[in-house]
Amino acid sequence: MEFLIRHAPFDRMVSAHIEFLAKHLRLGFYAKGEVVMEPADGAASRFYIIKQGRVRGEMSAVHETETILSNTTAREDRKSDLANDAAWELLTGECFPIGALLARRPVHTVHRAVEDSFCFELDREHFDYLIDQSPVFHDFCTRRLANLLDQALEGVQASLTASVSSGETSLNAPLSSLIRRAPVACLPQTPIREALLSMKNERVGSIVITDSKQKPMGVFTLHDLLDRVATASISLESPIDQVMTRLPLSMPPQAAAHEAAALMARMGFGHVCIVKDNRLIGVVSERDLFSLQRVGLVQLSRSITHAPNIATLVSLGKDIHRVIDLMLLQGASVTQLTQIITLLNDHITRRVITLCLTETGMPSVSFTWLSFGSEGRQEQTLKTDQDNGILFLAPDGRSAADVRAELLPLAQKINQALDACGYPLCPGHIMASNPECCLSLEEWKNRFRDWIEHGTPEHLLKASIFFDFRSLYGDRAPVEELQRWVAKRVKANTRFLRLMAENALRNWPPLGLVRDFVVESGGEHPHTIDLKLRGTTPFVDGARLLALANGISDTNSVARLRATAAAKAILTDEAEAWCDALAFIQLLRMRRHQQQERAGRPLDNHIDPDSLNELDRRILRESFRQARKLQTRLALDYQL
Amino acid sequence: MSWLARLFRPYVELPPGYADRVESWKNLSAISEKVPLDQARFLVVDVETSGLDVRKDRLLSIGAVAVEARRLRAGENFESILRREEVSERENILIHGIGPQVQAAGKPPEESLMKFLEFIGKIPLVAFHAGFDQAMLDRNLRETLGVRLPNAWIDLAHLAPALLPEAQLPRAGLDDWLSYFGLRAHARHRAVDDAMATGELFLILLQRALADGLDTVSSLHIVAQAHERKVLGNGMGGA
């Protein structure tokens, strides 16, 4: 069955199961326009694989009348538009109707051949047998999108690995698998000289200081020797606990390597103690995690945090891209990647602010630096504009305008410095140096209240950027207060929620009825899809609305969807499928950015679907289908 | 043996054990050609031979696959290579790909043919340029097992242009039709794969026949034969 082994998931099934399929599959032909299956057939009794051709799912008239609850004509019109839009297409190698077969129910849609098509079919009993026998097939049917994504990510890694030498550690591996040797440790009262001697004898760069029960108390590294012993003129006979770094990072052996990498990057430590039952069982260093790389995550974070001037930060910004390349290679997920990018960008922003403050001196009032948009959501890719602002608390006796006048020159300086570091100025002027984005807590509330109460299209557009805010520098408390305030206000205003829902339905995913994707027909980027506007925006908008409607103050889209599921407002399976779909589209964006960067071209979000391999095209279509599902859900919720 | 003696040979000397099997095949009841077209069972057949002369060239392999109720049953297929001592001519090996070693490793011809008989029963047979497959099989079955196939044959080389005049392929080969419909044989000139590809073409033609109101196996026959006569007539007229 050469056809089967060329298509997922059959390409990964064992030969006995392929032979079982080959024995029981029947091939049917459907002329253009012919119905393959429909709701009236009753509980789905066959599993289909398209061998050749295209099959479209259309909402049947019966199903429409079932679901239309409203009686107004306008709504019905909208509803049938929606039903039309909800149609989708399946292509060669794709399977249906998995959901209906698993649930023993009729299909919801009429499945019709769009062109002359051949489909393999398998009787339900054989489908059930295969689900039962083949873990691969079971996995494919029950978590279809996630399964395809795993495969795609393997593919990304394989292609990247091919271009670099192998032997890299997978970042998904548990830490226990990275322990190379028994830990080198000593007691706190050990003289420094003796500790150094064991490090030399054991040829390690670090030693863990433990108590008599082997519980880690501190770490000492060769790097510390220079700073804390040699240059500080401490006697080598002093006990090691005087110079060790206290409270070392500890993680359990089953934690994943990427979690250790993230922790190291956040804390700026190069070593993590692996601790089981309060006892040290090993040490993992950054070098263990990134065995081949020249520029490490920790080293990079540290260099950023200690950069003496803007010029140094400018050059470090380029290293971020190299680290991301490497992490993609090592199998980090998109969520991890976007968070690491955000983390490093946060480091740069904080260092820029600190450097600017050193130059200008501290202002007389404390302030909090805010980030909005993708940075506020911690979903940054390598292409990112500035979206920031300032929140301050005006002290008694001073007007907000007065404080603003003091802060604006500083904000201006910071915006310019960030621009120099590779974060272009925001064309929409959503920057702290804009007086409208440098406000007191009361002013921010007033501004947001105005939007929530009036909800003009411009307000909605602004809300879609500003409501995804978080603090980056300075006091966090007033920002958290503002986040809670927004969540509460929006939740209480059904009119605004409805307007947001309308807004969230504006960017329909580009699934075509005639071709599999709708591409731009003209403009600057003909025959492409805008992965941001058409791909991630529907999810981001939907997640924001779901979160705010349920009083959730998270700003990250994945966190918003999961919190909404935890609040039982959506199903966990739905939430996970939407997170997966969003992650995949982000992955495509990041790959696109990497390629453009390597080629020295400006970064954009336009992708030609024909340039994708079959698996990626299929996942992208599935991801767009998930976006439609999310939007259909919102449309029903708000009766749009 | 003279040609006369061969012609009047009363029966073939069957290898031991085959007489009963041939007998039970002969006892199978005939299939009515009035079976509704959308329910009927067919076997799509393809043979590979050492050449195009149905009287002299050797039958090398037989492939067949079942079509029932408008579905090609990929799992119900038949493939057999006939063991031959003589080596096939070089140029043909290049076409059918059955080299001397494979031929030597095949089954004894009587076993291949017997299995084929048992696989097809009296079910109607479908082939492209069916006349060739029919003549080749008839000769071999008669010489080896002493039987004559009563099965109906449907020739897609005539059925296809008859049902699809708009294709304007009145005398096209299998490859022309496959490419007209964008079909692709996995390994063209392997008997079973050719049978599968032919089967796919047949599914399309069945759909078309039903859409045109044909409802029995015999009506397919009539349409195909009418086309055959028309082509022959045209051919003679042109000559």
Image: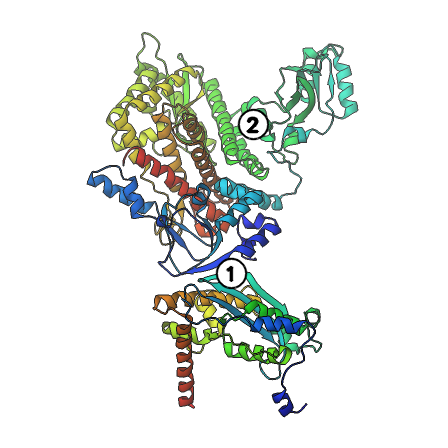
Neighbor class of circle 1 (other Cα within 10 Å; few <14, some 14-19, many 20+) is many
Q: Position of residue A239 (x, y in %)?
A: 73, 10
Left or right: where does residue A31 sit relative to residue A382?
Answer: left
Q: Amino acid at mark 1?
A: Arg
Total number of numbered labels? 2
Residue A530 lies left or right of residue A322; in this view the side is: left
Q: Which residue is at the front of the view, A175 or A34?
A: A34
Query: Is the residue marked by circle 2 packed among few (<14), some (14-19), or many (20+) residues within 10 Å?
Result: some
- Residue B43 screen position, x and y as percent: 51, 68
Instruction: Name the element at disc 1.
Output: strand
Inter-mark Cα distance, 1 to 2: 54 Å
Determine the image quadrant of residue A202.
top right
On-image quarter of the C terminus of chain B: bottom left
From the viewer's side, name the closer residue of A307 and A88.
A88
Viewer-nearest of discs 1 and 2: 1
Q: Quadrant of the N terminus of chain B?
A: bottom right
Q: Secondary structure beneath disc 2?
A: helix
Name the residue located 74 percent from the left edge and 14 percent from the top edge: A192
Left or right of A280? Residue A371 is left
Residue A262, disc: 2
Rendered location of residue A128, percent (x, y): 51, 45
Q: Does label 2 lie on the same chain as label 1?
A: no
Camera-side residue: A587 or A630?
A630
Depth check, front residue: A570 or A290: A570
Q: Chain of mark 2?
A: A
Name the residue at 58% across, 82% down. Answer: B54
Up the image or down, B112 lies above or below A399; here it is below
Can you see residue A426? no
The residue identified by callout 1 is B73
- Name the image colouring: rainbow
The amino acid marked with disc number 2 is Ala
In this rendering, would B239 be left or right of A498?
right
